[in-house]
């Protein structure tokens, strides 16, 4: 199937059909798992040409591998992007962007509600490298526009984890483009099912594929995608601008990142993980459809429940971010919801009383998962940033799975009643 035809097809069709699979060896319908560290050449000259970047071809799996390449190409096509780099985790994907675009002394502008792991990276290693992070409310476009001037890049989550605030990516992207500053969007919670990175207007997207892409919680991975919307020849980073002059305006970032971050730090994805995630990707649309409808139904049920203080889900009318979510994602508001129980001890008693829902730090799994963020993911984050992320002591985060929703309602109803007994 050629690329032009593919672009006209719906999400489920593009997710289930692997691009380029019509030329797979032996007519294999899945990209084979290439467990080979190195790749041989016919001649010394040929290998030298590959090293020089003048001839295509694999060299060594720390840099690139055909199984990993298949995931990169497939995911990039769902994001309507120009290409992607697969990394060993979502955090490695964020690190790849930082290493590619930042020098010591630089400043990053970040949305004020971020995933705990990202905050830990920003507040620890980046400080040691003299890279400053300025946190700005992405709901305030004017403030964001001022901050974006002169920054190495801007960083927001399309749906915040766990605040579940929804950022107007198009508006933020416009102010970033005016400042000639790339906008990087962590779209782990939305996934390309809710909206492709390019349609949102992001310049780069990062994803933790550990979550919805893998789907069954058995592998860790991440991706950086270039949507092709930023002209890297104009990059403030002289090395990336140089790379864009050599490899083209749209490929300058990816070429530099692959050569100097993936190759030189060894933070790329392993072939086995890519193979697992390619398998997950083929059913992403189907699972997301169910994740979203289950989350919506469970959020509605919990909102009516007498023992719950409040429920936060962007698909509910009561969410302050519902209008942006509806405009940007339609009914595809993701699988995460949070509830407040009035006290930390009640929140923890609810988690202990749930039987079906698993108490764990993961999310995006086919099984429903719950966690008490204040005492776990956010325990080492300072009070100011924890508060900005919406993490209170009485908050429970729920990643709604694909079970029968009536079973989930029963599990929560029974556990809520038990948690109310002191
Ligand atoms: C989980 C997560 C990450 C980190 O991904 P890992 O694969 O665990 O490294 C980054 N951003 C968001 C929004 C996440 O949920």
Image (cartoon, rainbow, N blue to C red):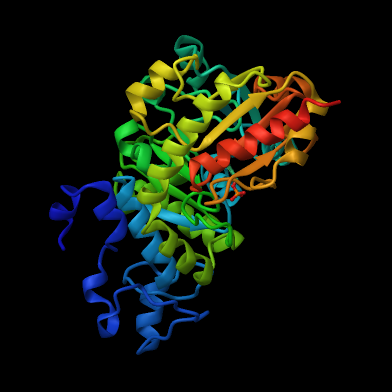
Residue 368: x, y in percent? 58, 45
User: In the image, residue 92 lies at what x, y percent?
Assistant: 59, 51
Q: Nearer the viewer, residue 277 or 50?
A: 277
Quarter of the image with the C terminus in it: top right
Q: Residue at x 44, y 71 (%)?
A: 65
Foreground residue among 391 and 336: 336
Q: Is residue 20 left or right of residue 382?
A: left
Nearer-the-camera pick, 50 or 383: 383
Q: Quadrant of residue 67?
A: bottom left
Q: Which quarter holds ligand 1?
A: top right
Query: Can residue 372 be seen here?
Result: yes
The extreme bottom residue here reads 42
Q: Count the numbered circles shown.
A: 0
Task: Name the residue at the right extreme.
Answer: 422
The residue at 72%/41% (across/down) is 125
Vertical order, 25 against 217 (above or below):
below
């Amino acid at each position: 199937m050629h690329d032009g035809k593919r672009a006209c097809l719906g999400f489920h069709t593009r997710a289930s059909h692997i691009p380029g699979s019509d030329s797979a060896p032996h007519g294999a319908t899945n990209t084979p798992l290439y467990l080979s560290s190195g790749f041989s050449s016919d001649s010394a000259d040929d290998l030298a040409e590959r090293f020089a970047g003048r001839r295509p071809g694999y060299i060594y799996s720390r840099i690139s591998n055909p199984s990993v390449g298949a995931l990169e190409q497939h995911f990039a096509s769902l994001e309507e992007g120009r290409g992607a780099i697969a990394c060993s985790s979502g955090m490695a994907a964020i690190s790849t962007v930082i290493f590619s675009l930042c020098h010591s002394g630089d400043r990053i502008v970040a949305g004020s509600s971020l995933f705990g792991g990202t905050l830990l990276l920003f507040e620890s290693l980046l400080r040691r490298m003299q890279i400053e992070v300025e946190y700005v409310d992405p709901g305030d476009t004017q403030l964001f526009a001022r901050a974006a001037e002169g920054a190495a890049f801007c960083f927001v989550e399309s749906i915040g984890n766990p605040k579940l605030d929804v950022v107007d990516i198009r508006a933020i992207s416009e102010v970033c483009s005016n400042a000639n500053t790339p906008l990087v969007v962590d779209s782990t919670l939305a996934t390309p099912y809710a909206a492709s990175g390019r349609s949102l207007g992001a310049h780069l997207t990062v994803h933790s594929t550990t979550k919805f892409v893998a789907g069954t919680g058995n592998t860790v991975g991440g991706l950086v995608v270039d949507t092709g919307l930023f002209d890297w020849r104009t990059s403030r980073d002289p090395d990336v601008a140089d790379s864009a002059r050599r490899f083209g305006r749209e490929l300058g970032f990816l070429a530099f990142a692959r050569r100097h971050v993936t190759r030189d730090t060894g933070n790329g994805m392993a072939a086995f993980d890519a193979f697992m995630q390619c398998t997950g990707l083929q059913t992403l649309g189907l699972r997301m459809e169910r994740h979203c409808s289950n989350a919506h139904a469970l959020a509605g049920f919990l909102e009516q429940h007498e023992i719950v203080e409040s429920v936060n889900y962007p698909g509910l009318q009561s969410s302050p971010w519902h209008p942006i979510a509806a405009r940007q994602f339609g009914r595809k508001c993701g699988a995460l919801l949070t509830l407040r129980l009035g006290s930390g001890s009640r929140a923890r008693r609810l988690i202990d009383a749930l039987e079906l829902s698993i108490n764990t730090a993961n999310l995006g799994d086919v099984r429903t998962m719950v966690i008490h963020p204040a005492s776990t993911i956010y325990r080492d984050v300072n009070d100011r940033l924890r508060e900005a992320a919406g993490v209170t002591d009485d908050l429970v985060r729920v990643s709604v799975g694909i079970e029968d929703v009536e079973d989930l309602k029963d599990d929560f109803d029974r556990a809520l009643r038990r948690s109310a007994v002191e």
